[in-house]
Image (cartoon, rainbow, N blue to C red):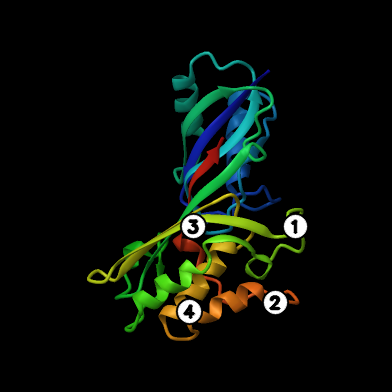
Amino acid sequence: MKNYVATVSYNGARFHGFERQPHLRTVQGSLEKALSTLCGKETLIKGAGRTDAGVHALGQRFSFHAEEIVDTGAFLFALNRLLPSDIVVKVIDEVGEDFDARHSSCGKIYCYRFSYGVRDPLQKELRAQLERRNFDVAAFKQALGYFVGEHDFSNFTTKPDDVDHFIRMIERIDAVVDETAKTGEVTFVGNGFMTYMVRLIMGCAFKAALGKIKPEDIPGLIAMKPRHIVAFKAPAEGLYLVEVLYA
């Protein structure tokens, strides 16, 4: 048996998240069903991250074991024929036996896409649409800046516990806002992101942009003890897993 890593892209709108769940349509379930059919035996995968329902991926990774794939191009073609139209596997590579798509990762890149102008029905599933007249771009960017660096993000995830004590490093947050089109995209680069973490950060930044909180309130929300999970969660449809990073 050989060990393989694959890169997958999907529109998450009609999936109940990535992780396999009984009787529900999930990305992992769809991939394992197609791979098992193609390989002629049950084939399970290990995914690098578990996206929520409605969240998309441009370059998520997963690993799996299979008999040697002699013709990768033919295998990819056959696999994608078996997959639903809202998933596509882009690349498959053989890797060493010690590689695990999830545990070998050293970081991830996410982006969040949104608009705050007139609602566009053609973008309904692909970006968050706030429909707000007033959006303070400066306050929005200032709020995001407070999340850069190493912090205890226990107030920005619903995980009940964490082996790393909720400590994560966000190396960079880049926010680009087109004030004419009233659209924006925020890119997050970090060593790990917990359940709902990006969406809760974006929710707070949106609250600051809309004048519901002050950007200066953010450090206090991060440091608040005892643990108090913030209640400002941005919509799932704006979030994309862009890339999984490996050393």
The residue that label 1 is drawn on is 162
Asked if residue 16 can be seen in this view, the reply is no
Q: Are marks 2 and 1 in contact (CB under 8 Å)?
A: no
Label 4 to label 2: alpha-carbon separation: 18 Å
Question: Which one is earlier in the sequence, the residue at label 4 or at label 2?
Answer: 4
The label nearer to you, 4 versus 2, is 4
Q: Residue at x 41, y 79 (%)?
A: 209
Question: Circle 4 sits in a helix, a strand or a loop, which is it?
Answer: helix
The residue that label 3 is drawn on is 13
Q: Amino acid at mark 2?
A: His
Q: Split into 4 quadrants, where in the image is the N terminus?
A: top right
Label 1 to label 3: alpha-carbon separation: 28 Å
The residue that label 4 is drawn on is 215
Asked if residue 8 can be seen in this view, the reply is yes
The residue that label 2 is drawn on is 228
Q: In the rendered image of this protein, does residue 214 appear above or below residue 142? A: below
> Residue 96, image x and y in percent?
63, 22
Q: Amino acid at mark 3?
A: Ala
Q: In the rendered image of this protein, does residue 223 appear above or below residue 188? A: below
Q: Is residue 212 left or right of residue 169?
A: left
Determine which quarter of the picture holds residue 151.
bottom right
Q: In the rendered image of this protein, does residue 137 appear above or below residue 100? A: below
Question: Circle 3 sits in a helix, a strand or a loop, which is it?
Answer: helix
Question: Which one is earlier in the sequence, the residue at label 4 or at label 1?
Answer: 1
